[in-house]
Image: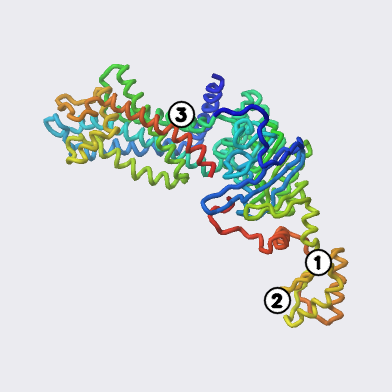
Amino acid sequence: MPREPGPLPHVGGVDHTDAVDIVSARGLVKTYGHVRALDGIDLTVEEGTVFGLLGPNGAGKTTAVRVLTTLLQPTAGSATVSGLDVVRDAAELRKRIGVSGQYAAVDENLTGFENLDMVGRLYHLGRARSRERAWELLERFDLVDAAKRPVGQYSGGMRRRLDLAGALVAQPPVLFLDEPTTGLDPRSRLGMWTVIQEFVAGGTTLLLTTQYLEEADRLADRIAVIDHGRVIAEGTADELKGRVGGERVEVTVARPQDLPRTVEALAPVAVGELLTEEHTRTVTAPVTGGAAALVAALRALDEAGIEVQDAGVRRPTLDDVFLALTGHEAEARTTEGTDA
Amino acid sequence: MSGLAQALGDGWTVTRRNLIKVKRVPDLLVGSTIAPIMFVLLFAFVFGGSISLPGAEQIDPALYREFLIAGIFAQTVVFGATITGTGMAQDVKSGIVDRFRSLPMAPSAVLVGRTTADVVNNVLTVVIMSLTGLAVGWRITTSVGEAALGYVLLLFFAYCISWLMAYVGLLVRTPEVFNNASFIVIFPLTFIANTFVPSENLPGPLRSFAEWNPISTVTQAARELFGNILPGTPEPTAWPLQNPVLYTLLWGVVLLAVFVPLTVRQYQRAAAR
């Protein structure tokens, strides 16, 4: 096809001259039949930062990562990574990214060393450099002792570490991690976080997806909340938590008839609107000051002579963010494909 | 040129990976050879005494064993080729195909690596089958060159079937489903042929099917090239069986021409669900 000379027009008419945007997606749509896995996603990730894509199962997180890593072609919209188009420049782009998926994509029959060595060769590092790099990574991820054992014998945490090591073989400037800790026990999860924090300290740009606000909070500089294939909120962890009202005191009373008086008693302690749930006999009051607010609340209830069954301070969870932002719980969608 | 060299290098890297699996999980190889050995013994000693060969004056189990082995070879290498489909379905399911597709490697490498490793697998199987054949009295009576051609033709035919299997494996995506489906199709195909009984013994429509079945012609070609056509056997009447080497090669070329591009496309699509 003949092309007119001169500069190409900017897609969508938006001029992103800001060169520090490593990942940039505009209006990404991916449909499967009637299901819109991605429904017009816009994302921007700055160089050297960690970007968290937060959402429940089926929200479109994995689909977004697969589009950005060239594994999937978008139905509409466009995206660039390191200035390369994910569709047109897919082959060139693959040289510059590392990907670690939700299901540790390692070969069970190969040893840890053989897995990494193979990946190195497929990045065309050459024979000697591939071996050398494999050992470097095994050492860094504390897998040297297991290096000569088939991966089939590894624990879940070890597999994830190996998979992550696989993504780092070519020292890519941009890294994509899809739910790096889903399914791991708490100890392995902490271990993964430490590892991830170590290498992002080295300046790698990272886009990670997660179902856990705590994880996004700990690792990401910026977070986009995604639901039904759309970005419904974006900001720093603190900004997002601010939107769901931060801490809250949750009180469960013994007798349902006490609920209206409970609301009255807690009103002076609360910094926002109170929420009553009849069937659980629970009143939730947004507060500041944590434990002190809880003491004040209990004192007020005691003075009003209300019998309290349970009380506590809660911090915002992903469910709270969801409830606040969408009005529905962050439940996995039951449409086809678990995490499309 | 460097593109081709790189593609070959990538293909070899994946081949090595698949061969390591054969080494580490020998069950696969054992599984794919135990069944044919059993077939040799069953047909040679149970059915062999009841199957009459055209041209033979009477039923002779020793002659039947000579007739049988090429048929078993054909059946075994075709079943060996189905491993390709199982392997591809497994790789898609386990997610390793995603890893491969995110790497800057040649898109053909995963398929080339898979099919090449399965040829090696088939070579090992054919060696074991030949030893079994020799043990029950089968002999090659032709020249080294003809015998080698016989083996190469069997392996080439299986290699072409491998690509078809890779395609189906990528479509099905579940190793268990693939195994069941391929067995239901391949098993009768290897029987409605001249593998275990002469096609002349089959009733009308089955006979025609058997005569045009490429599994028959690869068997017939192997029999001719190994010198296992019994004296007094009447000349085949169907064109494919009269020109078994040519007909088998034609099938192979067509299979490759159709399924190499189809499979590469399906591979790029399979993971891009």
- Mark 2 — residue? A278
Label 2 sits on what residue type?
Glu
Judging from the image, mark 3 belongs to the subunit labelled B
Label 3 Cα crowd, 10 Å radius (few <14 / some 14-19 / many 20+): many
Where residue A9 appears, x then y in whole percent?
66, 35
Rendered position, B23 above or below A196: above
Q: State which quadrant residue A283 falls in.
A: bottom right
- Callout 2: helix, strand or loop? loop
**Relative side of A128 to A313, left or right:** left
Are both tags, 2 and 1, on one chain?
yes
Are both tags, 3 and 2, on one chain?
no
Between marks 1 and 3 in the image, the one whose residue lies nearer the viewer: 1
Between marks 3 and 2 in the image, the one whose residue lies nearer the viewer: 2
Judging from the image, mark 1 belongs to the subunit labelled A
Where residue A268 appears, x then y in whole percent?
87, 73
Q: Residue at x 59, y 51 (%)?
A: A37
- Callout 1: helix, strand or loop? strand
Q: How far separated are the C-alphas under marks 2 and 1?
A: 18 Å
Instruction: Identify the mark nearer the N-term, 2 or 1.
Output: 2
Question: Is the residue under label 3 in contact with that under label 1 (CB below 8 Å)?
Answer: no
Rendered position, A238 above or below B59: below
**Relative side of A216 to B251, left or right:** right
Q: Residue at x 39, y 35 (%)?
A: B80
Q: Residue at x 55, y 27 (%)?
A: B10
- Mark 3 — residue? B116
